[in-house]
Image (cartoon, coloured by chain):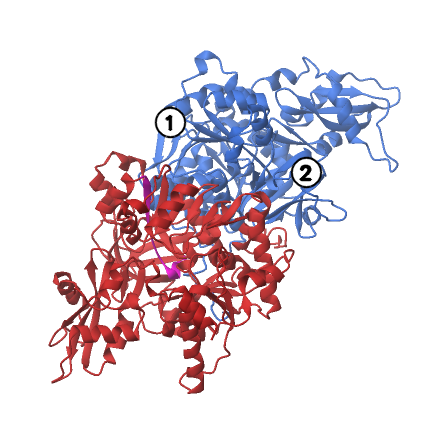
Chain colours: A blue, B red
Amino acid sequence: MDRLVKCPANYVPLTPLTFLKRASMVYSSRTSVIYGGVRFTWLQTYERCCRLAYSLRSLNVVKNDVVSVLAPNIPALYEMHFAVPMAGAVLNAINTRLDAKNIATILRHSEAKVFFIDYQYVPVASEALRLLVDGSKDGSLAEYAMPLVIVIDDVDTPTGVRLGNLEYEQLVLHGNPQYPGEELEDEWDAIALNYTSGTTSAPKGVVYSHRGAFLSTMSLIQGWEMGTEAVYLWSLPMFHCNGWTFTWGVAARGGTNVCIRNTTAKEMYKSISQHKVTHMCCAPIVFNIILEAKPHEQCEITNKVNILTGGAPPPAALLEKMEGLGFHIMHAYGLTEATGPALVCEWQTKWNQLSKDNQARLKARQGVGILTLADVDVKNKKTMESVPHDGTTMGEIVLRGSSIMKGYLKDEKETAKAFHKGWFFTGDVGVIHPDGYLEIRDRSKDVIISGGENISSVELESILFKHPNILEAAVVAMPHPRWGETPCAFVVLKNARTTTESEILTYCRQKMSKFMVPKKVEFVTELPKNGTNKVLKAELREIAKTLKISENTPTNNKRSEPRYQQDELYDQDKILAMSRL
Amino acid sequence: MDRLVKCPANYVPLTPLTFLKRASMVYSSRTSVIYGGVRFTWLQTYERCCRLAYSLRSLNVVKNDVVSVLAPNIPALYEMHFAVPMAGAVLNAINTRLDAKNIATILRHSEAKVFFIDYQYVPVASEALRLLVDGSKDGSLAEYAMPLVIVIDDVDTPTGVRLGNLEYEQLVLHGNPQYPGEELEDEWDAIALNYTSGTTSAPKGVVYSHRGAFLSTMSLIQGWEMGTEAVYLWSLPMFHCNGWTFTWGVAARGGTNVCIRNTTAKEMYKSISQHKVTHMCCAPIVFNIILEAKPHEQCEITNKVNILTGGAPPPAALLEKMEGLGFHIMHAYGLTEATGPALVCEWQTKWNQLSKDNQARLKARQGVGILTLADVDVKNKKTMESVPHDGTTMGEIVLRGSSIMKGYLKDEKETAKAFHKGWFFTGDVGVIHPDGYLEIRDRSKDVIISGGENISSVELESILFKHPNILEAAVVAMPHPRWGETPCAFVVLKNARTTTESEILTYCRQKMSKFMVPKKVEFVTELPKNGTNKVLKAELREIAKTLKISENTPTNNKRSEPRYQQDELYDQDKILAMSRL
């Protein structure tokens, strides 16, 4: 048995790139991408990716180089999921909600060699680049070669916005459609780098392997039972774990990607109705956007739309309303480190007999491990014993399998902390029910999930600590009717200092991405602590539940708008004016 | 990127064994196996496998040991697909249609350490064992330690048949249900060994890796879109590429295995109706069995049954009749070396508009590569150039990917021949249509597929050559209305010798498994040959098309019975009598 050796015919590195090549051959004339008035076929998408990969190589991009991109769900970002790794490089899709400082930190930490910028994000990207240059000049940041900047103009209605000389479509145009891509030597090689705010203020760059991406993709199109010819609406940002792997998954199934720039009710209704969308992913917050649509924003939905949701358990009332509109919802649980969803709440036929309430309760559970995960368990972290399947004994949720990240880029300490005794520790606390389904009971103490975005309480605290009047600060999640959770800051002021909530919030707005700004600041004389002087966050969370979200805080108006709209973007004229400087 | 290393949390060897463990946890109380009056849950199946694996270890089975089994589609054979590799060993499921000589050859070639025998097969297995002993004694066979024999009595209605002291249920009973199985060190390790008659008379043992088995399973449940809670009828022998990987696949989806001992019309109708079967695999010959069922053998079929068929393109008339009965048929193409189906004829919605005739024509094509196959192509073997996608230019079908076999056991020469210039050569000749779908135009010259079973023409010829009156012989496929193809032998007699067709057929029956016996012997004065004296089989195949199948040949009556019935088995009393000797 041992004498049979691997050869190129029977051992081919696993990579989701094969899905695109296959799609170009077996679904060649099927529509791959729709975006406004633009449509591509799978053959065209493949050739565009070959061209772009070729151009990247011409620009000296080599193996393991990081190619960053700041863009909404446009065709270019979709194509880069294939073209960048075809060039041997690593795709780093940056969260478009981050501020210039965070973006600069990511560019520097990842040592991005190329930085693609959607035209709408030129202002914030320019600011990030300026911060990088300034930081290098004054010595506050380590030396780092600036990335090559490439603007992505709108492919449907070009605007002429530029930053430097290079533009995406030009790269595609001048590339070679016959370029086969670099040969993948090892499926363990990196394919993508996704930053998570995580639990500390240092950026954590989660690295995926080709193998992990391939396996996760296979599992998720399976776990969700996404069949061939799916029409997939890009309501979930592609920068979230590479669109929960469906960037690659839609190619695997020969489906159609419906790209939309803004996840507004109008855009979603229009796309679903016009293109007969069958599948979409989103955080439960998007349910509100759909349900609260004004009559003129709505279109009739005639086909069943499957929604995979995650980030927070979908509330029963929302589930019922959505299903009434023709949506079929499946709940998943995951995290960046697990390449997106790692568990799905697989539906059991016998549950159809239950009351709607009970169905919603079951659907809100996190569920069962996907097929490529070798194991999921809930363990007592100290003893490493598995909890009984009784639905009440709590423990930490741990995962094992080849779809788990390679590790954190340039962070051996955090990598070692995450991988422990053969398991990946999620930091989330859960139980296992007698039927084997897992349910989260308490999330990691340090993460607040607001509208599908992770916010690090530690990061917020470290910023608050720097305020001249603040002695101590602790940030915890407080429930929010719309966003699920929102940060609530408990603050102890320095002796004899006075500050208002409004002043602190204004300070926060200057120092952090807007979505991270707390919705409530509570002044206290001291923080509850245990014997070793550790803040008792559980107590603070209990208090936060009783507090009222502050009205009319500077950020509150902004946050109550659907955050998917362009509230944080400059208008087009301003961008054009800036880009011509 | 390179500093992130594999660890037990993020790199777990791929193996279909994880599917069973997962099923035991998330589908614990769901029915895993139904066989007559016997029912198991997934938890029970898992524990039975742990027990059996433990007992195998107790019997000194170690890594890479071959465990052979001769059994129909019974629960034991299903369980062995997990239990044997859990013990670190390699499962060798032997084709139950082989004769004692072939079985002996396989046991010797594989050096089987343990030999499980279903009680019905005790007679032919005893004969095979006797051949092994005799061969060792007279020196005609290489020395080889005899396998440990374990009889599998019927789990539903025990018969008491034994051969030696060991019985399957005793092993299960005395095993340890908490035994976790041996830890898999490397996903490249062997999991199964399947013999194919192939193109030469030497047995070829196709070895699968855990990785290949895992990936094929994932692809096939996907390509066929087999959802969760499938009820799978075992109409396809598990010994055929491990049931085209659905042995493992049903566990992956938490489905139910409906095991039947005999693939008769009555058994199939009853199972489909009673257990609401949703999925089954079979060669097109089984369509005939279903369609020709007598009224008392039929039951009403109320649910849609998905059939995956392969081995031969399903004829249009049969397709239409079957779909009229509520069956939905998908066509696949594969071979043992590719771990079963490697291409599936993925249906396209737009084809629903076409006429039934056109639909059948499209459905009969071999289709597109499954997702874990890195590449499928049709190439000119000499130049290695790909054929154009024009539906007419022919070339050899070649495959690449991690679901291709590790190689042929102890046969470096054949392994090297199969793997060539980075591809696996199927030996089949095909075209690629403009829509990217592949169609076979001419099968490997040396293989005849009769009723889903491969027959090697080279093997038949080598037996015919040994007949005292035969000078030359060439065997080709001839069309058969029921079996698809059947062997037709062209024979040149030695000078002055005379022999009848009937005599040659009688000779064949003594020398080969019954299903291999030609249905036609044509006497000729010489064989058509080319300049290098090679027989022009293409010419013979043309002639064979014009010949009439011989009536009343000794084997013909036998062959016109559904071969899935017990036509070749001894009756139970006789077996019992033998086993008591």
Residue B395 percent location from the top left of the image = 25, 58
Q: Which residue corresponds to the image point at 72% horizontal and 38% vertical from the top-left?
A: A394
Could you tell me which secondary element the residue under label 2 belongs to? Answer: strand
Determine which quarter of the picture holds residue B324: top left
Considering depth in this image, is A99 or B357 the residue closer to the camera?
Answer: B357
Q: Nearer the viewer, mark 2 or mark 1?
A: 2
- Total number of numbered labels? 2
Q: Earlier in the sequence, mark 2 or mark 1?
A: 1
| B114 left or right of A521 in image | left
Q: What is the span of residues highlighted in magenta in the rendered image?
A: B326-339
> In the picture shown, does residue A176 fall above or below B81?
above
> Distance of mark 2 from mark 1, alpha carbons?
41 Å
> In the picture shown, does residue A195 fall above or below B242?
above
From the image, give the main secondary structure of the stretch colored magenta: strand
Q: Mark 1 belongs to which amino acid? A: His
The residue identified by callout 1 is A275
Residue B69 percent location from the top left of the image = 46, 65
Report crowding for label 1: few under 14, some 14 to 19, many 20 or more residues within 10 A (C-alpha).
some
Is residue A552 something one can see in this rendering?
A: yes
Considering depth in this image, is A452 or B2 the residue closer to the camera?
Answer: A452
> In the picture shown, does residue A504 fall above or below B361?
above
Residue A192 percent location from the top left of the image = 54, 44
Q: Mark 2 belongs to which amino acid? A: Val
Residue A512 percent location from the top left of the image = 67, 27
| A494 left or right of A429 in image | right
| Residue A431 badge | 2
Is residue A50 something one can see in this rendering?
A: no
Q: Are marks 2 and 1 on the same chain?
A: yes
Could you tell me which secondary element the residue under label 1 belongs to? Answer: helix
